[in-house]
Amino acid sequence: MGSGKGRTRRAQAVATPLNPDMSAFSEKSWDEFVASTGIKTTKLFRYYLGDDVALPSDSQYEKLVDEMFADMVSVGAIVLPRPYESRDFVFKMEKPSYYKQMVVRLKSKPEQDAQIVFNPTYSLNKNITMAGYGTSDAVRRVYRAIVALLEPIL
């Protein structure tokens, strides 16, 4: 979290899915995490990459989304179905069509079709803050991709 520096403690998950075999989403948990830790105006890239990168590399985008996802799970913004944990997923920049997209796969099923999350070069920029719309939108898109990825196997 925060470039691996542990500047903010990850909390226990607070939302629970109605069905333990499905995931749950709570944007309120993300908003509370950002507000309670005093990082509302912190730039997204600075928080996760340690710098205000103008144009992140593919590996930097992957790191950012991976760490943001771990935070989403730890604060209860996303509650994964049992037995999954945030480290069971891998986020990669790939070119499934005309332009690169962030995709997510289960580490244990690399042959499974990846789910497109979003195009971070379009969705995220150096001016987006931790409480900004772009970050909230990314949180929602990650959740939808995780649900689409898990739906066929649950």
Image: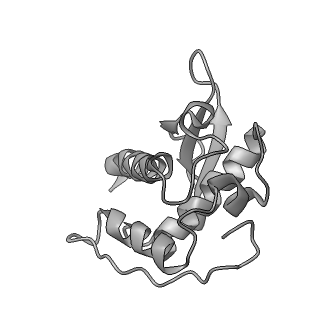
Q: Residue 129, position in %: x, y?
A: 57, 55
Quarter of the image that includes the N terminus: bottom right
Q: Position of residue 101 (x, y in %)?
A: 58, 31
**Farthest residue toward the top?**
98
Residue at image x 69%, y 68%?
2
Residue drawn at x 37%, y 47% as measured from the top left: 144
Q: List x then y, in percent, for residue 154.
A: 32, 56
Seen from the viewer's position, the closer of residues 55 and 60 is: 55
Q: Report the residue at 56% width, 76% height from top.
A: 38
Q: Does residue 99 lie above or below 63 as drawn?
A: above
Query: Is 78 situated above or below 119?
Result: below
**Is residue 96 rendered to the left or right of residue 17?**
right
Residue 76 visible, this angle:
no
Q: Is residue 88 left or right of residue 153?
A: right
Residue 129 in sight in this render: yes
Q: Residue at x 44, y 72 (%)?
A: 83
* Farthest front residue in view: 41
